[in-house]
Image (cartoon, rainbow, N blue to C red):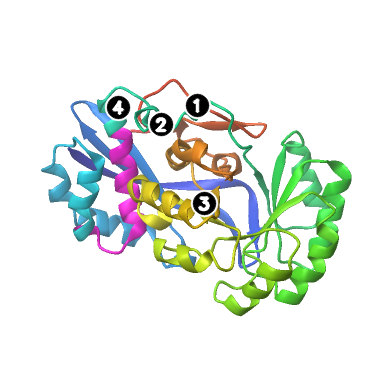
């Protein structure tokens, strides 16, 4: 195989503010693997919260160049195991390479990846949520009006006007709301807000407390009338058993676990523990979201709106329209990139 690394900056349509930061541009690493004239692509964003940068991701992947370029891809699982010792503990590097390998493998086999795995995504799927970041009520409502026909909205929490935002949006739509505090609330705030929220069609609250506030989560699991989902508290497969005691479900993002290959076992483990599956993404382009969407039929909830937040189009693939995933007639993960 031939290995190529492309760094891509993704400017957002609007500054996205969550409780711990504001983002206007996201830096990503795109991996291209080529074999027999076919190309597969994978993508990961850098994530300062998890200590990940495009420079480090690129350096780790380049350290495996010889192993990659002397390998003939026939099975992405065997390839992932072959590379993992070299890529080390860098899950983002693992994920970008594995994503590209799975895409290429599907193209080699001349079939969509979901079809090879028998996952049937063209059946009845959960709706995809659309993210609304923190801001003034006027700006939040203005951005809502651009996509006022979506069935589900994910509303970022963590500001003084949290409840006013929810009230204002509820006056405009009967759509389902999901709230994501990114760890900004405490126990008292969560329980107080939940008393009003329980009658406002709130599907769940994602990561209300700091990731390490397990005592607080124990209280919420018992007393909160709205289901609680883990994100930042769920950073590796080893967290699943613990999360089962404190949450109702978990947000599964492929980049956390090292790619599509290990994520298959992660989903199975989550189900074994009786937890709900929220299939999520970061601020990622069509490349990464198309890869994640291969698992859509295994999820209870879908949060795959990364490309909707980005101004720059890097390719075609799986897309969301009014909350519904649309799969292209393409092999692999369905991606075609617009750059060379």
- Residue behind mark 3: 282
Residue 100 within the magenta-colored segment of the rendering: yes
Counting residues from the start of the chain, the first of labels 4 and 3 encountered is 4
The label number, if any, that marks residue 121 in the structure image: none
Q: Is residue 141 among the parts visible in the rendering?
A: yes
Above or below residue 85? Residue 69 is: above
Above or below residue 275? Residue 181 is: below
Q: Are marks 4 and 2 in contact (CB under 8 Å)?
A: no
* Residue at screen point 25% across, 27% down: 108
Instruction: Tell me the distance, in whole angstroms, between the alpha carbons under discs 1 and 3.
Output: 20 Å
- Residue behind mark 4: 107
Question: Quick one: label 3, few (<14), some, or many (20+) residues within 10 Å?
Answer: many
Counting residues from the start of the chain, the first of labels 4 and 2 encountered is 4
Q: Which residues are magenta?
A: 86-104
Counting residues from the start of the chain, the first of labels 1 and 3 encountered is 3
- Residue behind mark 2: 114
Q: Nearer the viewer, residue 329 or 119?
A: 119
Counting residues from the start of the chain, the first of labels 3 and 2 encountered is 2
Above or below residue 48? Residue 118 is: above
Mark 1, secondary structure of its residue: loop
Question: Quick one: label 1, few (<14), some, or many (20+) residues within 10 Å?
Answer: some
Counting residues from the start of the chain, the first of labels 1 and 2 encountered is 2
Prevailing SS of the magenta stretch:
helix
- Residue behind mark 1: 327
């Amino acid at each position: 195989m031939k290995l190529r690394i492309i760094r891509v900056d993704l400017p957002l349509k609007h500054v996205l503010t969550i409780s711990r930061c504001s983002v206007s541009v996201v830096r990503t690493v795109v991996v291209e693997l080529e074999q027999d004239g076919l190309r597969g692509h994978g993508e990961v964003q850098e994530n300062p919260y998890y200590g990940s940068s495009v420079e480090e991701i690129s350096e780790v992947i380049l350290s495996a160049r010889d192993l990659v370029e002397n390998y003939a891809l026939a099975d992405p699982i065997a390839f992932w195991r072959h590379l993992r010792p070299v890529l080390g503990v860098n899950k983002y590097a693992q994920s970008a390479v594995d994503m590209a390998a799975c895409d290429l493998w599907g193209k080699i086999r001349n079939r969509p990846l979901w079809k090879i795995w028998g996952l049937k995504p063209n059946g009845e799927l959960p709706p995809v949520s659309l993210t609304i970041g923190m801001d003034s009520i006027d700006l939040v409502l203005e951005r809502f009006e651009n996509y006022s026909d979506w069935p589900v909205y994910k509303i970022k929490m963590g500001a003084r006007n949290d409840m006013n935002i929810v009230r204002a949006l509820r006056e405009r739509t009967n759509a389902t709301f999901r709230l994501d505090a990114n760890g900004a609330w405490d126990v008292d705030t969560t329980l107080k807000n939940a008393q009003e929220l329980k009658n406002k069609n709130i599907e769940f609250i994602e990561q209300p407390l700091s990731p390490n506030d397990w005592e607080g989560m124990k209280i919420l699991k018992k007393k909160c009338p709205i289901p609680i989902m883990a994100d930042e508290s769920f950073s590796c497969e080893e967290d699943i058993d613990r999360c089962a005691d404190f949450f109702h479900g978990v947000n599964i993002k492929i980049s956390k676990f090292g790619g599509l290959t290990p994520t298959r076992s992660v989903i199975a483990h989550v189900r074994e523990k009786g937890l709900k599956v929220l299939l999520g993404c970061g601020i990622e382009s069509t490349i990464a979201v198309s890869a994640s969407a291969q698992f859509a039929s295994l999820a209870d909830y879908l949060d795959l709106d990364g490309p909707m937040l980005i101004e720059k189009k890097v390719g075609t693939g799986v897309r969301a329209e009014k909350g519904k995933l649309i799969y292209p007639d393409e092999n692999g993960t369905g991606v075609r990139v617009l750059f060379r």
